[in-house]
Amino acid sequence: MLLAGGLCAGLVLAEGICRLTVSNPITGPPDPDRTSWRVEGLVNDPLVGFSFQPGFSGRMSLPGDYDVPFRISPQGLRDDRIFGPTHEGITRILLVGDSFVFGVGVELQDTLGALLESTLNADGSGSQQVQVVPVGVPSYGLDDYTKLVERWIPLVKPDLVLVAFFSGNDMLDYDLKARDKRVVIEGRLAKERQAWSWGLRKYSVLAHLLLQRFNPLERIEISKPLHPTPKDLAQEYRSMQPWIARLAAAPGPDGPPLAVWLLSEKFTVLKLRSGDTGYVPAPLGGVISDFRRLGCKVFEPVQAWVEAPDPVSRYFFIKDAHYSADGTRLLAHWLAPQLRKSFGPPLAGQARGSAAAETMTDAPQPSPR
């Protein structure tokens, strides 16, 4: 009895020490030296793996860069409105992307979608009011954009589909997710290996540590090579081509036109500002050519970056790779007249069949899932 009591007391003491000293890898305090916001408020999504929880409210915080609140609508979007399928008298743009469309680090009114909408409506050159439906979640990639376009077109009946393609990582994100899958645990993304013992950790941190050696899932460490070989780049491009074709065909023959809006990373912008206006990150050139060959309009804001009056650092956060409010404003103001020029005053030629005006109170509320 003394031996059993001593053993129990030792285990209780060890458990207490572990709880005090071993931080939770998923919900514990983030690394103070981190370079990006730790995304929260997610739920599992059978179509794209994960998306934001409808109705969630939280904050995006990165010391030295930003600390702003955000809210998720009942439809799972970062927006204060509900979008139904009817929109009489309104030209609607479906804007699809990742964290840049979501607006990491900026207030809602400074996101790409909000600024594009306000700019298009402010110039008064359109025959109808313009409305932008922003569908974006951090870590999404080309395959997710394709599935989202297929999901949201019947829900909101857009007149134009605009895909915000980030040249920094969109060419590899979907491949990484396929090789090292993530699951949602308490609103955050975790590797499958971490999720295996998550339930046990809730009851005993000590047992969680001791039983890790029996984890049947292999530890996977994947990193993008700093200097990929031509063979690596060719493989990346080949793996993307089926998704490019499926995305271009997603609206269907009678659906809205689909355009691609290229978003450049900081290094690319620095190259452009240094005078190398012909610089195109590999294999982005092939991606652009494929979209154009498939009939998609591609908007490349090279001129906007070259003619920007302020230093590049003004348009990006210091630690984070995302655009500051000045960066999103620059791109939205550049794109608005390009859309007018390419798609005419109502952008898509006409407002697609809407039988009744949509209101904020009685509009249908289709679930994005």
Image: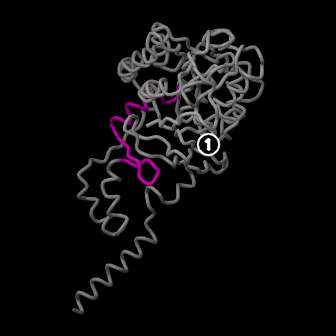
**Residue drawn at (31%, 78%) of the image:** 11
**Residue drawn at (51%, 38%) of the image:** 138
Q: Which residue is mark 1?
A: 319
Instruction: Give the quadrant of the N terminus.
Output: bottom left
Magenta stretch holds residue 161? no
Q: Is residue 215 visible?
A: yes
Q: Is 286 above or below relative to 319?
A: above
Is residue 42 toward the left or the right of residue 214 in the image? right
Which residue is more in the foreground, 216 or 85? 85
Magenta stretch holds residue 168? yes
Q: Quarter-wise, where is residue 341 in the image?
A: top right
Highlighted range, magenta: 166-191
Instruction: Give the quadrant of the C terminus.
Output: top left
Q: Is 147 above or below relative to 35?
A: above
**Residue drawn at (43%, 41%) of the image:** 50
Q: Is residue 272 visible?
A: no
- x and y percentages locating residue 323 in the rendered image: 64, 34
